[in-house]
Each structure stands twice: as structure tokens, then as C-alpha cells.
Image (cartoon, rainbow, N blue to C red):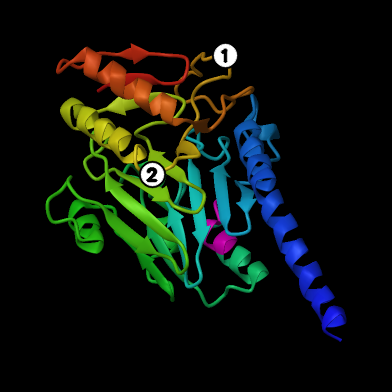
Amino acid sequence: MTQFSSRPAERLWRLILMVAAMLPIFSAARADALVEKTWIHGSANCAENRDAPLETFQFDADTYIFRQNKCLNFEGPFIYVMFGQHTVFIQDTGATADAAQFPLHETVRRLMRQRGDEKLNILVTHSHSHGDHIAGDAQFRGQPGVTLVEPNAPAVREHFGFTNWPDGVATIDLGGRTLTVLPAPGHQDEALVVYDERTRWLLTGDSLYPGRLYVRDWAAFRASVEHLVTFTKTHPVSAIMGTHIELARNGEQYPAGTTHQPDEASLVLTTRDLEELDRLLQQAGAEPKQIATQRFIVWPK
């Protein structure tokens, strides 16, 4: 009797071990798919473009990346959506306000319905407050179950509890999933970087991405990048991702304002890229200067 009853338990244990052994393979496959992902990237003639206004890419069961159609707005920003047990986190709301043209809120709600997560709260934050990252705020403002952190200094600092900006970090509890929020001024005064402990992504907004890194406060930008490097020394990072792509795979820049970007560089950067940015900024010193590499271009404003 004992021998018979132990077999199901043994089979279950072997299944658990097999699944556990395969998880790194699944994780690596997802990471490779993200690195090699070809996003919707506009058209030479936008009158002929038939892409959806918003592309949805599911990375894992609870993590999504949206990309706005460049024929709707040339900025083509990326938006990050992460599900926890009680809250859905959304970073940025895109470059178009009109919900009919750019149904961001409805896309999130539809995703929640498909998942059976209609009752979850929604938290909307921003990588920074430039117009191409906050235009869709009105779609969320005042909606039931939604907390929208307004994109201004008082609201950001109050919500996250920053009392000595830009020092300190904050955390967001989504329920079984914790995000770390780090001040990162330089591109813009209220710029934030978000670290997700589950995917080990570092979301850098407009502070670091494959494109032109517009720097408005040189000293603050240098300090922010240095702080991010320090953070990555104690937190494993699988991918660094910002909110735009402006380079081709060969490192060439697409013209500013273009609505067609064939053969885009990967959205994914690495800690080596962050360390290289830090090295070049420290080497440049206190005087702002343009720095061009095949992975990013530092562009003082």
C-alpha cells in the first residue's frame, strides 16, 4: 500500500524538478526573442500603413511592452505594462491624446478582461514629463480603480516619498512583484528609472536607449548615470530598455522626425552599455559635449 501511494508523489516531484530545470531555458528563449524582436516601425508612405496604432508584445505571463505606431506619431514611444496580484503598473501613456486614434486605456482594460483581472487597480506613472510620454493621461485620469501620478515635481515626489531629491529610492508593491524607483534627472528634471525584480529589467526612459540622449542638465545626467551603474552592481540586470529607438542595426541615426525606420537596432541594451556611457561621461568632464557611439549618442541641449 505504501509503495503504491508513493508513486504519484514521486511522479509529481520528478515533474517539478523537470519544470524547474527547464525554466532557465524558457527564460533565455524569452530574452532572445526580446533582443531580436522586430517592432512595428512606420512606413515610407503612412497613407498606406495598416499597422495597429499600438503593438502589444507579451514577454511573459505578466509582462507586456507596447509600441506606438510611428505613423500615428513619429516618436514611436514604448510603454511598459506589468501585472501584479493586486495592481497593474503602466509606465508612460504615449504621444497621442485622442482615445479614438490611440486607445491605450481600452487596450489595457481589454487585456485585463482577457486575463480575468478586471478588478485589479491600475497605477500610471511616467519615465518623465515630456509630451510624447504623457499625452494619453486623460484616458486614465478620473477612471475608477486608477491612480495617475501627475507628471510634475510635487506630485512625483509626494507619491513616491522622495524627500531629498534626487537622493533615495522608492518601491512599488504590485502584489507579489516589487518595482524599485530611482530618480534620474538630467534628460528632464523629474526623470525616473524603474527596476523590476522579476524580469530584472532596468527601464531607463529617455536617459538611455539606442538613439539620441538629449541632455538638458549635464551635471545631473552624469551623476544619474553614475548612480545607475552603482545600482546595477548590487542588482542583477537582464536588460536595459528605454522608450525610443532612433538607430539602425548598423549604428546609423535615423533622421529626426522620420516615420519610417526599417532595420531598427534592438530595443535592448546591457549593463556594458550603461558602464560605457558612464565612462565616456566621466572622461568628458564637466563641459557638455556630444559623444557618438554605435549604441547611443549623447546630445547636450
Kindly report the distance in space between the C-alpha atoms of the residues bearing marks 2 and 1.
30 Å
Amino acid marked by disc 1: Asn
Secondary structure beneath dot 2 equals loop
Which of label 2 and label 1 is nearer to you?
2
Q: Nearer the viewer, residue 250 or 40?
A: 250
Mark 2 touching mark 1, by CB under 8 A?
A: no
Whether residue 73 is visible to the viewer of this picture, yes or no, is yes
Secondary structure beneath dot 1 equals loop
Label 1 Cα crowd, 10 Å radius (few <14 / some 14-19 / many 20+):
few
Q: Nearer the viewer, residue 260 or 156?
A: 156
- First in sequence: mark 2 vs mark 1: 2
Q: Is residue 91 left or right of residue 101?
A: left
Please name the residue shown 64% across and 29% down the image.
43
In the rendered image, the vertical position of residue 58 relative to residue 209, given as above or below: below
Label 2 Cα crowd, 10 Å radius (few <14 / some 14-19 / many 20+):
few
Please name the residue shown 36% across and 25% down the image.
275
The range drawn in magenta is 101-108
Q: Nearer the viewer, residue 78 or 270?
A: 270
The residue indicated by pointer 2 is: 235
In the rendered image, the vertical position of residue 23 relative to residue 9, given as above or below: above
Q: Is residue 187 magenta?
A: no
| Quadrant in the rendering for residue 110 | bottom right
**Residue 257 % position (x, y):** 47, 26
Residue 78's tag is none
Whether residue 95 is visible to the viewer of this picture, yes or no, is no
**Count of marks overlaid on the render:** 2
**Residue 253 % position (x, y):** 48, 16
The residue indicated by pointer 1 is: 250
